[in-house]
Image (cartoon, rainbow, N blue to C red):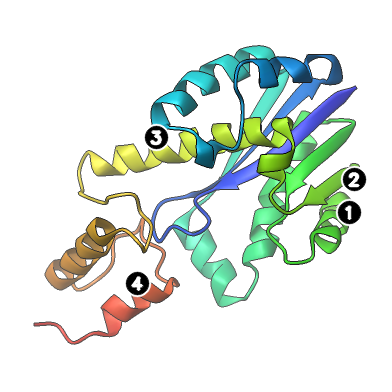
């Protein structure tokens, strides 16, 4: 029996991709993920996540990653369809992995509704929960794959720009976007223009 876990990273960021990752593992090997220390990626250091990433892909039968670009995210937000965009990428990952059952971290306030919609999209059995990344080790493993992939994307951007973590709560990120806009009179393509902090920067009078 092939069990799948699916999670995302970067949904709340104001720049870079939204990353959805899924892992598929035979039910008999799930304990191996717990034994190596797999848990919710938010409870792990960057170094631990990198180490576990390498171990996870050796244990699982398969894994898949799908990314939504800032442009795609902006289009979805403007249409009030961000949850739908995430479910499209989750369905893409699940269809590729072809599991017997999938456990997913719901982005909808109604986890059951989200699970039913996702099941229709990928024609597969779905178990949808809030905080699934903390409840099911298969989802924790997916959260690590997603987070490491997302961190690598931000690190790539950071080689040329002081982008910080990419989150609106990061002063370094806000200052980078503000200074870029003041200099170029437009936002970089990797910034999500539909995000409130980005809109605020654009609306403020330039010095």
Where residue 16 appears, as percent x and y from the top left, is 41, 51
**What distance separates the C-alpha of mark 2 from that of mark 4?**
37 Å
Up the image or down, 49 lies above or below 41; here it is: above
Q: In the image, 33: left or right of 2?
A: left
Residue shown at 16% from the left, 66% from the top: 179
Q: Are marks 1 and 2 in contact (CB under 8 Å)?
A: yes
Residue located beneath label 2 in the image: 123
Instruction: For mark 1, give the secondary structure.
Output: helix
Residue located beneath label 3 in the image: 152
Instruction: For mark 2, give the secondary structure.
Output: loop
Residue located beneath label 1 in the image: 120
- Front label number (3 vs 2): 3
Where residue 26 appears, as percent x and y from the top left, is 82, 18
Q: Can residue 93 be seen here? A: no
Q: Residues within 10 Å of mark 2 (few under 14, many from 20)?
A: few
Where residue 192 appears, as percent x and y from the top left, is 41, 64
Q: Going from the N terminus, do you reach mark 3 or mark 4 first?
A: 3
**What distance separates the C-alpha of mark 4 from that of mark 1?**
35 Å
Q: Residues within 10 Å of mark 1 (few under 14, many from 20)?
A: few
Tell which residue pokes out farthest to the left in this image: 207
Quarter-of-image position of residue 76: bottom right
- Front label number (2 vs 4): 4
Q: Residues within 10 Å of mark 4 (few under 14, many from 20)?
A: many
Looking at the image, which is closer to me, 162 or 127?
127
Q: Going from the N terminus, do you reach mark 2 or mark 4 first?
A: 2
**What distance separates the C-alpha of mark 3 from that of mark 4?**
23 Å
Up the image or down, 3 lies above or below 127; here it is: above
Instruction: For mark 4, give the secondary structure.
Output: helix
Q: Which mark is residue 198?
A: 4
């Amino acid at each position: 029996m092939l069990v799948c876990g699916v999670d995302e990273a970067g949904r709340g960021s104001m720049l870079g991709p939204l990353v959805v990752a899924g892992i598929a593992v035979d039910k008999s090997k799930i304990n191996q993920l717990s034994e190596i220390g797999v848990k919710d990626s938010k409870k792990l250091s960057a170094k631990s996540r990198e180490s576990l990433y390498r171990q996870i892909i050796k244990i699982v039968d398969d894994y898949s990653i799908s990314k939504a670009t800032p442009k795609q995210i902006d289009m979805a937000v403007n249409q009030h369809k961000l949850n739908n965009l995430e479910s499209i990428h989750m369905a893409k990952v699940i269809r590729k992995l072809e599991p017997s059952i999938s456990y997913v971290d719901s982005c909808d306030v109604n986890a059951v509704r989200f699970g039913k919609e996702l099941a229709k999209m990928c024609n597969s059995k779905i178990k949808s929960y809030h905080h699934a990344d903390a409840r099911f080790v298969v989802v924790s493993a997916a959260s690590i794959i997603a987070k490491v992939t997302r961190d690598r994307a931000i690190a790539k951007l950071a080689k040329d720009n002081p982008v910080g973590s990419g989150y609106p709560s990061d002063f370094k990120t806000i200052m980078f976007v503000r200074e870029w806009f003041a200099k170029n009179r437009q936002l970089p393509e990797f910034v999500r223009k539909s995000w409130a902090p980005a809109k605020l920067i654009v609306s403020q009078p330039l010095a």
